[in-house]
Image: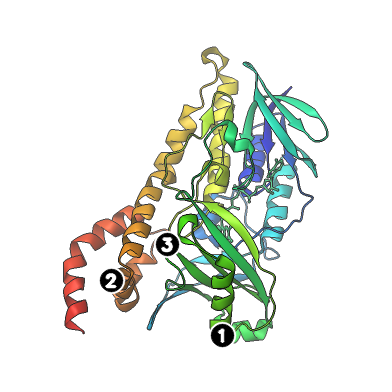
Amino acid sequence: MYDLIIVGGGPAGSSAGRRAGIKGLHTLLIEKEVFPRYKACGGALSERALSYLDFPLPQSVREREIFGVRFRFKDSVIEGFHESRIATMVTRSILDDYLLEKGREAGIEIKVGENVIDCKEQGEFVEIITNKDVYRSKFVIIGEGSQGKMKRKVRSIDTKYEYGVCIVADVEEDIEKIDQVMSNIMEIHFDVLNMGYGWIFPHKNYYSVGIGAFAYKIINPKRIMNEFLKTKGFNGTFRLRGHTIPAGGITRNVVSPRVVLVGDAAGFVDPFAGEGIAYAIRSGQIAVEVIAENIRDTNHGAQLGQYESICQREFADDFKYALLSVKMMHRFPNFFFKILTGNQEVFEKFIQIPNLTRHYRSYLEWLIPRLPQYLFSLFASR
Ligand SMILES: Cc1cc2nc3c(=O)[nH]c(=O)nc-3n(C[C@H](O)[C@H](O)[C@H](O)COP(=O)(O)OP(=O)(O)OC[C@H]3O[C@@H](n4cnc5c(N)ncnc54)[C@H](O)[C@@H]3O)c2cc1C
């Protein structure tokens, strides 16, 4: 009987594993792939994500530091730089492998290449059935990402209004060329598709180029992606990889009596930016803190509700404002994105969000009273 079984070795699972090892919980982590494995991602690690790690990320994992953001909407382009770093670019196969090793280093047992096929709550324990064996544990954390099926034991499946679809390609380029063209700036294109955006992120020797939008708005994503690549001058044949991404800001069950969902499985992704690594790391840690407390205090039975309230307080409440921003901005794109890409103050305040000095809520509270003034100047400039 384990104290804890963790399903999935992505950032959510491995961070939970590391915290469980540090806390001395008898823990087994099961991952279906053999690491390092490919993961479709833009690979932008925010300052928030780095701040959650209890160790420095080594140079071998960091590929590039980002200090600037460039937004494009039709004929408007705006860019801004920060003195402090906005993001660190990583390749997910390398990052995830490193994070999993940090879990192993904390003393947990890890099985890779083993697929969890069922999870059964049995009163005082949970049974985990894999393609190889059956295990028992007092508690289970499910960090299977957005595409696994175990989460359905706790919450209903997302509708097309509750998740996004992304397509990404890694476009190889010489390091010197990337240094010249966009060494430390990331580019976001708001005119590629509705309820989403296109991105170009510089890595060490490739660009991550991608598009993503809410599933109900995206028809023929492959065609949109190919057009985006072509317009940006990326000619050639690239391997396109599709992936789903849950939208945060939507109410979902994330706990059952002995099972906790973390990361993408819980739907913890910023619905505006699509950032999920930070919240995967943090939710994994919070889940273990709450489970460890339950294991210490056996008098009150399993009580995991605290997990939900801590996540809400720390980050998930702000997802509702991020979702509101997406809906508002994409409902009237010619107004909002013109303002965002045509007004330095609106833009500067917006990029304080990834820079950790502002939340979506305070951004909207700042922006909304100023909208009539911006509307007037937009008309006056015509
Ligand atoms: C195209 C794209 C671009 C993105 N870009 C960014 C970005 O630039 N920055 C950012 O912060 N976020 C980004 N995200 C979001 C980010 O990738 C996710 O939020 C993050 O990976 C969530 O981590 P996780 O650990 O919850 O899930 P995952 O990283 O998906 O890990 C889940 C793990 O569980 C394993 N697993 C699944 N099912 C089972 C099973 N049955 N048994 C055992 N193991 C299983 C999988 O193999 C996988 O290793 C992007 C997402 C997409 C789709």
- Residue 370 at what x, y percent from top left? 19, 65
Of the numbered discs 2 and 1, the one sitting upstream in the chain is: 1
For residue 314, the mark is none
Q: Give the colouring mode of the picture.
A: rainbow
What amino acid is found at the position of numbered circle 2 in the picture? Answer: Phe
Q: Which residue is mark 1?
A: 181
> What residue sits 62% from the left and 34% below the top?
141
CA separation, marks 2 and 1? 30 Å
Q: Is residue 249 left or right of residue 246?
A: left
> What residue sits 38% from the left and 54% below the top?
322
Residue 137 drawn above or below residue 247? above
Mark 2 residue crowding within 10 angstroms, few (<14) / some (14–19) / many (20+): some
- Residue 50 at what x, y percent from top left? 55, 56
What amino acid is found at the position of numbered circle 1 in the picture? Answer: Val
Which of discs 3 and 1 lies nearer the camera? The answer is 3
Outermost residue to the front: 219
Which residue is at the front of the view, 280 or 199? Answer: 199
- Residue 59 at what x, y percent from top left? 67, 65
Residue 108 in view in this figure: no
For residue 195, the mark is 3
Q: Which residue is mark 2?
A: 335
Residue 327 drawn above or below residue 340? above
Q: Is residue 174 left or right of residue 256?
A: right
Q: Secondary structure at mark 3?
A: loop
Residue 172 in view in this figure: yes
CA separation, marks 3 and 2? 15 Å
